[in-house]
Amino acid sequence: MHMRAKKTPRPAALIAFVLCFFLFCAGATTGKASADVPEPSIVFYVSTLGNDAWSGKLSQPDAGHKDGPFATLAAARDAIRKLKAQGLLTQPVTVYVRGGTYALDKTLLFTVADSGTEKTPISYAAYRDETPLLSGGIQITGWAKAAKGELWEAEVPGVREGQCYPHQLFVNGERRQRARTPNTGFFRIDGKITKQKPEFKFHEGDIKPEWAGQKDLDLVLLQAWTVLRAHIVKVNASARTARLSVEFAPDVQEEGAHYWVENTFDALDSPGEWYLNRESGKLYYWPMPGEDMERSEVIAPALTELLRFQGGTQGDSRPGGSAFGFDPVHDIHFQGFTLSYTDWSMAASGSVDIQGAFTLAAAVEVSDAHSIIIENSVLKHLGQFAIELGKACKGNRIVGNEMADLGAGAVKIGEPKDPNDTEEATSGNIVSDNRIHDVGVVDAGADAIWIGLSSGNTIAHNEVSNVYHSGIAVGWTWGYLPTAAYSNLIEYNHIHHVGRGVMGDLGCVYLLGVQPGTVVRHNFCHDVTRSDSSYGGWGIYTDEGSSQILIENNVVFHTQDAGFHQHYGQNNIIRNNIFALGQTSQLRRTDEEPGHSFSFEHNIVLWDSGVLLDQEWKDNNFGFDNNLYFYAGSGGSSAIRFDGLTFQEWQKRGQDVHSIVADPLFTDFHKGDFSLQLESPARRIGFEPIDVSQAGPRVKR
C-alpha cells in the first residue's frame, strides 16, 4: 500500500477557510442566525444633575458641563419619540435613571407614540446599584414653633388659594396620622343607622355640636364590607343624633358599627398627629419624640397619579392599529424604581365605598395597553391603589415588586362592567412574586388585589399581609348572570393577617359570580379576624353565585370563622385542602338552593373549638366523601357533629361514605406545620401532601 503525502495548505487558503468557518458559526452565511443576534441598545441617561437641553447620552455631566444626562424622564421619553418619528428606532432602547428624588409636577404620560415592540422594547431602568425615587409630593419647609403646646406650624403652598389640599403627611419617610379621635380604636353607633336619612345616634360625648359644618372634618364609618367618609351636617345634642353629608351604603346595617372623626383641630392631641386648615393653609404638627422639625424632611402629596400608560381608541391604518378602533400602548418596561407620595381625593360631599374600594384610582394607571412590565420596584406611601390595569389591558406583567403603606389596595385589574367587545376586554395579565403589605390605611374596605370582570389572569407567588378586607378578590357579578370573569388562576400565594379585627364579610380569597375555569390552588392562608360588630372572617369564600370553580391543595388555618364558606353557587369542587382551627366553625354554607352546590373530597379538617358545619345543610344538595376529620379539643371524636348528626347518621344521608375520623398526624399544627408524618392515615383517603413552602415570592428581596 502506498501512502500519499499530505499537502500543506497554502496560507491564503487557510485564512479563507478559517474566515468562512467563523462566518458560518456566526450565522452570516444563511442570514437566519444573524437575525437572532440582538441589536445593541440605544441608551439614554437621566440624572438629578442633568439638563433637559443636553443629549442624554452621558451618564454624568462632562468636564465642561456642556453635555450630559437629561434631568427628567419626560425629556428621555420625548427624545425616543423623535427617534421613532425619524424612523431610526430599529433597536431596543434603555433609559438608565440615576439615583435621587425626581419630584413630578404632573403625571408622567406614555401613549401609543412611546411604544416599543416585542423585539425592540423601551425600558426605563434604575442605574446599577442606585434607586431613583419618583415623588408626587412637595416638601414642607419654614417650620416654626406654634403658640399651642408642643405644636409646630408651617404653610402649605397653594392651600389657601384653593389650588390643592393634601390629605396625607410623611415625616422622614413615615406616614403620620391625621388628627383623630379617638386616638386608638373606635367610637360606636348607638344602635343601628337610620336608612331613611343619613343619620345615626351617638353615645354621650362622642360627637361635638361645633363639628357640624366643618368642611375639613371627616367622619369615617365602617360597616362590614363598606366604608363611608363624610362631613357632619347637623348635630342634635339633646337627641344625640348626627346627620351626615352622604347616604349610607345599601344592604348593610350593623349594631354598634365602628367610626372615628379626623382632621379637626381639637383632635390634635398626640405626638405624630397633624391638622391642615383649609382657609389659612396652615399645617399644624405635633412631632414624635426626637424629631427636629428644622431638620426633618416633611412631604405632603400633591399628585394622585404618578405614571399613566394610555393607549388610544381612535384607531388608524398603521401597522398594529386595531380594526376595532383600539391602538394600544405597548412594550414598555419599568424596573428598579421607588414610587411614592401620592394623595387621595373625594367629592366635596363625601364618598361611600360599597365594596373593595374599586372606584379609587391608582398611582400607576394603565389602560388600552399590552406588554407593559413593572418589576423590581417599590410602590409605597400612596394614597389610593398602587397599580390599575384598566380597560383593554392584555399581557401586562407586575412582577417582583414591594407594595406597602397603601391608602387603598395594591393591584386592580379590569372593570366593574362587562367589556363592549373582545378588544375592550382585559385579560391575560400576570401579577406574581410581589410583597404586598399594610393595605387600606385610608380606605379599610380595599382588597389587596382586585379582579373585576376580567379573565385569564394569573395571580401567583405573592405575599399579601396586613390587609383590612380581602387579600385577593375575583369577580364582580352577583348571582348567576353572565360574566367576563373566568379562567383566572390564583396559585401559590401566601395570604395572612387579613381583616385585622376591623372589617367584616371577607376572606383570604374572595370569589363572586359564575367563573368557569377559575382555579384557586396551593395558597397558604392564615390569621383571619373580623370586626366584633360584624361577621365573616373566612378563609376561602365563594360568595353569591360563585360557580364552576376548582379549589384544591390550599392550606387554611386560624380563621375567626369558617376556613371555607359558600354563600351560594353551583358545581364547585373543593378537594385536597387542609382546613384547620377555625374558631367559630370550619365549613359554612349560608343558603340552600336547588342544584349541586359543591363536591368536598379528599380534604383534611381539623379543629379544637367551634362547630364543624355552620348554617344550612339540610337539603343534601352537596357531596362529601374521602375526607378526614379530627377534633383536637376536649371530648375527642365523640364531640364531632355534622350539623347535629353523628358521623354514622351523616353517612346514612349518603355523605362521607368513605371518609374517616382520625388524627392526621401533622408535624406540628399548633405552629402552622401541616406536613404529614410517615404513618399519617391521610393517605387512606387519597390525600396528597401539600408543600406550603412554595407559597409566596420565589425571589427574596
Image: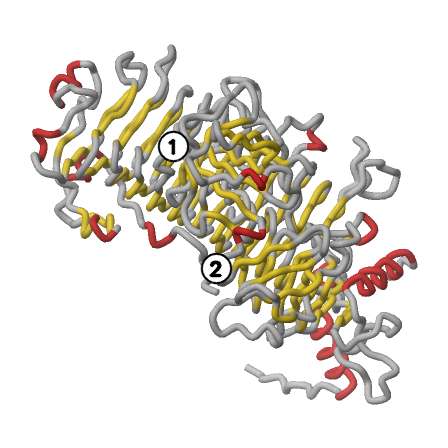
Q: Give residue 21's position: percent from left, percent from top.
A: 70, 74
Quadrant housing residue 647: top left
Q: What number is the disc on residue 534?
A: 1
**Nearest to the observer: residue 33 or residue 346:** 346
Q: What number is the disc on residue 174?
A: none
Q: Secondary structure at mark 1?
A: loop
Residue farthest front in this picture: 238
Q: Give residue 278's position: percent from left, percent from top.
A: 70, 51
Q: Quadrant of the N terminus?
A: bottom right
**Nearest to the observer: residue 346 or residue 541:** 346
Residue 676 visible here: yes
The three-letter code of the residue at mark 1 reads Ser
**Nearest to the observer: residue 203 or residue 308:** 203
Label 2 Cα neighbours within 10 Å, binned few <14 / some 14-19 / many ≥20: some
Quadrant housing residue 520: top left
Which circle, 2 or 1, is nearer the viewer? Answer: 2
